[in-house]
Image (cartoon, coloured by chain):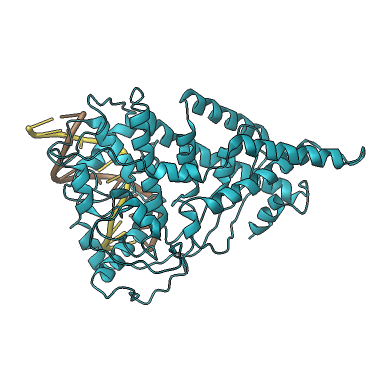
Chain colours: A cyan, B brown, C yellow
Amino acid sequence: MSLFSPDPSAQAALSSVDYAQDLLGSDVSGASLQVKTEDSWEDSFRETCPICGDKVSGYHYGLLTCESCKGFFKRTVQNDKRYTCLEKQSCPIDKTQRTRCPSCRFHKCLSVGMRLEAVRADRTRGGRNKLGPLYRRDRQLKQQRRGLDSSPAGISVYGIKLEYSFQPQGGTPPTPSPSPCSYEDSQSTGLGFSSPLESPLPGCLPELCDPYCQEVKSEWLCSSQVRPPLPSPSLLPEMMHCELEEAALRARVLGHLQRELASRGKHDRLNTLGIMCRVADQTLFALVEWVRGCVFFKQLTIEVSTIVSQAGDALTSLLSRSQELVSKLRTLQLDRQEFVCLKYLVLFNPDVKGLAGCSAVERVQEQVNRSLMSYTAQEHPQHPDKFGQLLLKLPEIRSIGLQAEEYLYTRHLQGDLPCNNLLTEMLHAKQP
DNA sequence: GTAGCCTTGAAC
DNA sequence: GTTCAAGGCTAC
């Protein structure tokens, strides 16, 4: 069984911190495929490091990398190093030139998906972390992909039935094409692959390529003679197109609230929590509308959700954390494009507990990462660290979302929340 | 600072 | 007991 898992908790927290800092969201969990093969592990070592192309030594901080990039990433994060690129933040990173520009090397580490949170703050040695299941799934998916590569198209491998799939927007199956395709071409048939086990078409732009498509990657990342432009931010206009107009959203939420307050009698007034829940409810409607309309999400099917949630009394802390986050984002001069990218990164979160079939989500995350990196490099060259700084805010955004969720769940269990609204419905859905 | 090898220890 | 992804050590 396999599920896709959007994470509106953090979405809500991120989207509404300006005017309603206690929104909830939902999470889903489900079983994941558990297949381990000897071949897949051996095959892992035949791959090349997605950062420099050197020989892979194993999974490190979220993906298969070489020993030196592992060490570089560890040193950088552990020692909180800040690098500055002396060129245009687009230095080629390969085995022979990887030590030339640590700034671009670190950006590449982040953009291909190395996880900051996998570097232990307490420097504890040994043991395993929460990425273990991800590594297992990745190994398994690689194995599946190899099976697909050597099998006729469309035939399932190992008899595993997929319950979740990327679906072409037009409902027509993707047509394999041996020639390179444009982003628009890919859009016209959805993302061009119908399950997380299938790779995108060969020859597509790197933004739409699978993270392990080394042939294409090396072409645009490592060539020093003909260097293509920075990873195209062409995804951004598409993402911005789906964006709700914030002023209109505010007006809608406030208008609804005013009408509700006006319709209530003297003895039927809403208390503060009631007002906040109404705001949360309307914002959730808007968020659901955004999620439904957003690029990528339209191509997903979603299954049921369950979660075990624990209650906590945290409104003060929640508000203070949210305000602090907003303040940090303002200090970073977060603009609308970056805000939208963060929203996508929060929504398409492969770390969601119990998420299976997450490779498609990881691919989306990687594409958005690239778009964000490209955008910040082009639009804010005076702030070369901005991409990394923005990514560092994601754990806090997600954490605030979870805290909001826990708080609301507690109040929900105590019967403090108004009935018959979307918020309550979502909280009901979270009961184990 | 880099990168290859070693040690550690939780998950299986 | 084995695995393997963390952090540590150290020659360069």
Residue drawn at 33 percent across, 31 percent down: A377
Q: Quadrant of the C terminus of chain A?
A: bottom right
Residue nearer the viewer, A385 or A257: A257
Residue A66, visible in the rendered structure: no
Residue A385, visible in the rendered structure: yes
Is A427 left or right of A187, judged from the image as shown? Answer: right
Q: Quarter of the image holding residue A158? A: bottom left
Is A194 left or right of A339, judged from the image as shown? Answer: left
Q: How many marks?
A: 0
Residue drawn at 65 percent across, 58 percent down: A429
Give how far across and how far down residue A146 sits, in percent.
25, 67
Residue drawn at 54 percent across, 30 percent down: A325
Give how far across and how far down residue A59 sits, in percent.
28, 51
Image: A296 above or below A121: below
Give how far across and how far down residue A52 sits, in percent.
19, 43
Residue nearer the viewer, A361 or A172: A172
Is A14 left or right of A188, judged from the image as shown? Answer: right
Give how far across and how far down residue A56 sits, in percent.
20, 51
